[in-house]
Image (spheres, rainbow, N blue to C red):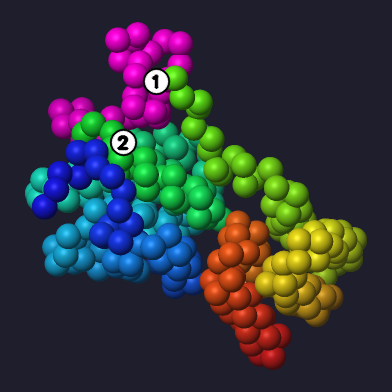
Amino acid sequence: MHDPRKPRLLKHRSLNVLVVDTNNFSRGLIAEILRSLNVTNISSARDAELAHAFLIDRPIDVILVSWEETDAFDGLGFIRAIRRLPDDRNRRLPVILVTSGLTRQTVIAGRDAGADEFLAKPISPAALQQRLQMVVETPRPFVDCSVFLGPCRRRKNPADYYGAKRRAGERTAERPAMIDQDEVARDMPIRRALSRLREICAALRASRPETLNAALEELKTAKVIAIDQKDHALHAGLASFESYIVVATPLGQVDQSVVDTALTALEQLSALPQTFAEARDSVAIALGKAIQKKLAA
């Protein structure tokens, strides 16, 4: 088997990816996005025990660890455990940390735990493609010493840097700086609208009708954007969520886990290009069914 720290051309169909995520919906969605990028060899694990079993049972090239601070699953602890594995190849595998709470502190903590790269939720296929290229085609050197075990903790891979301070003898070509696809996605109008909606919905209470009105106004704005973009899946998802808060809020029966799941689904729809029709339709349909089931309970 090849050395995971040796640069090679990214060949999607021969890439073996392990997805570790405790949430069934999120785990399936990540796998769907990988398949859309022509990655077909995908192993999915709901916990650390199953993930370790996959590492023993089959050759893995890249590990995607989906983790939130509120999870019972210790994502950073799992990455540290990977870096301490007795098998030299497995402990040197590239690890991409996927999270919605991608803050500077998360990056520092993930880097110190041994993560190679970071990917923000909702996942943009372009951003995922970019991270796969980075860990496969320009992997960071692996550091094995008494104070640290993992990829070099410099945030920018030397092979990707072409600025003024790069030594002249190493500069083979002047290239533009890499565009971070996560930054591009966050600036989209629909993403800004959904971000405001998430902030408003954190305060949904039966005793505060003004908050519900504010949420409905933001939903209206988002639906207009969806209509303008002829985005039927997103519009359907927004309508489903609207039906839930309209019924549940006045009754004082808003379930925050339902709100969070719905908003996560809407954010993911906004990040998936419309060319991903099958994946987008499945997200919208799953959201609609989940909300109908909740309202009927």
Identify the residue at image location x=45%, y=68%: 32
Residue, disc 1: 173
Q: At which x and y percent is residue 48?
A: 28, 62
Label 2 residue SS: loop
Q: Nearer the viewer, mark 1 or mark 2?
A: 1
Residue, disc 2: 138
Q: Image height check: is 161 above or below 132?
A: above
Label 1 residue SS: loop
Check disc 2 and give the amino acid type.
Thr
Q: Image height check: is 235 above or below 158?
A: below
Q: At which x and y percent is residue 15?
A: 28, 57
In magenta stretch: residue 149: yes
Identify the residue at image location x=37%, y=44%: 133
Q: How many marks?
A: 2
Relative to residue 117, is residue 282 drawn left or right? right
Check disc 1 and give the amino acid type.
Ala
Q: At which x and y percent is residue 156?
A: 40, 28
Classify 10 Å Cα crowding around label 2: few (below 14), some (14-19), many (20 and above): some
Identify the residue at image location x=39%, y=20%: 173
Relative to residue 18, is residue 24 drawn left or right? right
Instruction: Name the one closer to the observer, 202 or 110.
Output: 110
Q: At which x and y percent is residue 230?
A: 76, 66
Q: What segment is highlighted magenta in the picture?
A: 143-172
* Disc on the earlier residue, 1 or 2: 2
Query: The C terminus is located in which quarter?
Result: bottom right
The disc placed on residue 57 is none
Query: Is residue 74 visible from the viewing direction of this image?
Result: no
Magenta highlight: main SS? loop
